[in-house]
Amino acid sequence: MKRAFTMAEVLITIGIIGVVAAMTLPALINNAQNKELEEGLKRSYSILSQALDMYYAQNGEKLTIESVGQYELKTTLMKYLNVLHDCGLGYDDFDKACMPNPSNPDFEDNGQVNMYRTYNNKTDISMSRFDDGQLVLNDGSLILFDNSIYSTSLLISVDINGFHKNPNKLGQDLFMFQIDAKGTLLPMGVEGTDYYSKTNEYCSPTSTSNMNGAGCTYRALTDKTFFRRRGR
């Protein structure tokens, strides 16, 4: 007489496997996304730092706010980057990898575009520091510049997985950098940058600031647990 599993036993086993998979799969997907974002930020930091180094090697001086005119930061740096698409200022690029520019007086959202949210997803971020030029690099990252007549510092921000891919939150996949007076690229949030705060106002799970997340770049690069607890 041969012994075998009954149909009921097989179904119970499959059910248990399904429950275990349903419990563990979201965590595995989330961990993979966190790792992708972490590596993407490090890569973007390196790419931007190398571009500034190449500018220095070619021009014999560091790039600072004194050496570039209004809206010139993008056109100055793009020759040192592997650019897939020049977005200009981002006007009307709904069907491309670029982010439509809400500062354009002719821009009408009409529910077509979801802009970036704060780190804790409490509100939309202020877009005034991201609207002076855009580039899409060949790795899919979106580079955003702040360099207008009203700018008191040079800012470069990176959506490391592109505008059309979530989470689209400041401090989670959108990270800010600042070029200081000496031409050094600083991760936003380090002391001396525009969004440094002793109280973590700009990288907090509870802050109501519309720039909450701006100061997360430094923490994301130095805290090994940052991406594992992002948004909490």
Image (cartoon, grey):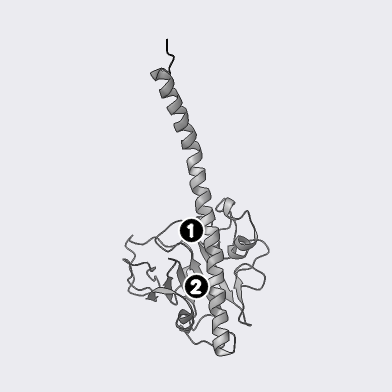
In the displayed structure image, the side of residue 41 where residue 94 appears, left or right: left
- Furthest-bottom residue in view? 60
What residue is pinned by disc 1?
A: 123
In the displayed structure image, the side of residue 66 where residue 11 appears, left or right: left
Nearer to the camera, 129 or 22: 22
Nearer to the camera, 88 or 83: 83
Vertical side of 127 occupied by 122: above or below: above
Q: Nearer the viewer, mark 1 or mark 2?
A: 2
Q: Residue at x 61, y 73 (%)?
A: 186
Q: Classify mark 2: helix, strand or loop.
A: helix
**CA gap, disc 1 to disc 2?**
16 Å
- Where, by quadrant of the figure, is residue 223 drawn? bottom right
Q: Position of residue 67 (x, y in %)?
A: 55, 88
Q: Position of residue 140 (x, y in %)?
A: 43, 65
Q: Residue at x 60, y 81 (%)?
A: 183
Q: Which mark is residue 157?
A: none
Mark before the other along the chain sequence, 1 or 2: 1
Q: Residue at x 46, y 71 (%)?
A: 143
Regarding residue 178, the answer to whether it shows in the image is: yes
- Where, by quadrant of the figure, is residue 98 drawn? bottom left
The amino acid type found where label 2 is placed reads Arg
What residue is pinned by disc 2?
A: 129
Q: Are marks 1 and 2 in contact (CB under 8 Å)?
A: no
